[in-house]
Each structure stands twice: as structure tokens, then as C-alpha cells.
Image (tube, rainbow, N blue to C red):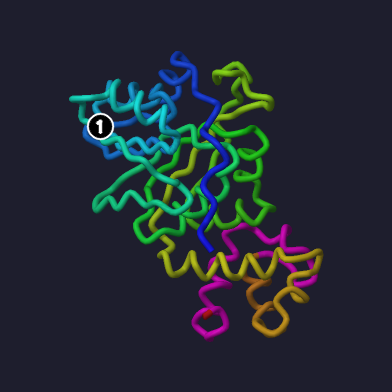
Amino acid sequence: MARPVPEGPQQHDLDAAIAARFVSGARVKPGERVLDAGAGFGAITAELLQAGAQVTCAEFAPERLAALRQRFEGRDCEVVSADLRSWSPGFVGPWRVVANPPFHLTAELVRRWVLGDRPPHALDLVLQHETAEKLSAPGTRSGALLACAGEATFVARLPREATNPPSRVNLAVWRFRRDRDASQRDLAAVDMLLARAFAGPRTVAEALRGIASAVQLKRQGAEQGWSPQGHPREVPPRAWLPLARLLAMCGKLA
């Protein structure tokens, strides 16, 4: 069955003045390869170009695509028609995301970018306030995955009037910076482990029964500072990485 297309265009385009402050805070360097995902009418893209970035802006809505192509014709800017849930930019070298992505796709996009074959080294996003809090929280599945890959930060609150039209919910600036300790294979193992651990209201020992022995859990808990009899949200976020590596080495997370 064909995958359904997004439910209408991105409706919350970032105010130009807010976009200028947002891009300034992202500290984009001249020559950096940057993706503006869900570019809308180009408020962020314009500021990225002003900063000297090499920009790819991805958008799905036809009227916004037409406006983007007209606005940035002749500039160092690639305008792409894309369903962000399945499209990959295919960049070869280092790249980053600076964007105000469609709110209903945010969590899915962040996970795809972090787990992808060629992940960005940084994400700077305007999100719904609640989503930014969840992505930064240590006791959530998303927060734990991101902690194993780098550092997620809730940067600042934004008023609802930061977008046109005004958002119905509060907004925030959220940031993620990748470190090089965990490989993509490691992160895939962490993701599988977290899916199992956070599947229900169970202790770590109960959730991982059949893939981790009591001895393994006791040893890992003692080394990393958590109890197998506690809930997964009580495990320090980065402690999932050595446990995932151990279980993957034992063939339990294939």
C-alpha cells in the first residue's frame, strides 16, 4: 500500500525577525552545508544564506515550493520537493539541520536524522514547547537515545506569535550536538533496546527478560548506577549504551 502524503502544508512559518535571531544563535559558519527542513516561505533559508551557508531547503507544499524557487533563484540554494518522512538529502560531507520542521513530524524526523547512515552533526530546531521538553528529558525513550548520541538542550522559550499565523501552543528553540563516541550500529542497538524497555510499565528486569540475564543486569546496574528492579526511566540515559553494546555482542539485539 502506498504511503499517505503529509496532511497538508506546514502552516506555521517563522517570523522573519525571530528567524534572524534563531539562525544567529545557531552559529552557522560560512560554507557549512545546512538543511532547512520544511522551509515554508524561506525565512530561515534567507538568514542561512546571509550567514554564508550552502543551503538545501526541502518543502512539500506546491505554493511554498514555487515561492522558494522564485525568491532564491540565482542564489547558492537548492530547493527540493520532498516528503521529509522518507526523503534523505544524501550529503556526502558534514552537514547540519537548522529548521522549523512540520510540528506533527518533529519526533519522527529527529529519530531518522540521528539513526541515519550519514547523520547530521548538529540540529537546531524550532519546535512545540512540549516536544522540546520530551526530547531533552533524561527519563524518556527519545531523551535516552539522544543522550547516547550527543547532547540535547532546551535553549529558549518562544511566544506563540513567533510564527505566522500564531501557533496554538507554546514554542521553543531546541538544540542537539552530536559526539563521536557511539557508532550508528551502537545507536541502532540502543534504539532496539529502548523500544523493548519502554514498551510498558515494567521494571528493567521484567522488560528485558529473555534478552538479558540477571547477572548481566546486576553487573551493568552496579557499574552504571541503576537498579534492575527500577523503572527504565530511572536508568541514567548514557547507561543504555554499554548495556546495548553488551547485548548486541551476545547476539541479543540482532
Residue kind at label 1, given as amino acid type: Cys
**Whole-percent x and y of residue 65?**
37, 31
Can residue 235 be found in the magenta stretch? yes
Q: Quadrant of the N terminus?
A: bottom right
Q: Residue at x 55, y 26 (%)?
A: 12
Q: Which residue is mark 1?
A: 77
In the image, taking residue 246 as reference, residue 180 lies left or right, namely left
Left or right: residue 148 versus residue 47 is right
Residue at (59, 22) in percent of width and height: 158
Determine the image quadrant of residue 166: top right
Q: Nearer the viewer, residue 247 or 108?
A: 108
When the figure is inspected, residue 109 is found, relative to residue 235, above or below; the finding is above
- Report the span colored magenta: 225-253
**Above or below, comparing residue 185 to residue 11 in the picture:** below
> Which quadrant of the view contains residue 181?
bottom left
Which residue is most to the top? 17
Residue at screen point 39% across, 44% down: 82
In this rendering, would 253 be left or right of 87? right
Which residue is outermost to the left? 74
Give yes or no for residue 181 being in the magenta stretch: no
The answer to which image quadrant residue 136 occupies is top right
Mark 1 is surrounded, within 10 Å at the Cα level, by few (under 14), some (14 to 19) or many (20 or more) other residues, namely: many
User: Which percent across, then down, holds residue 21?
Assistant: 44, 19
Provide residue 227's location: percent of width, then percent of height.
Answer: 75, 69
SS under mark 1: strand
Q: Residue at x 33, y 31 (%)?
A: 28
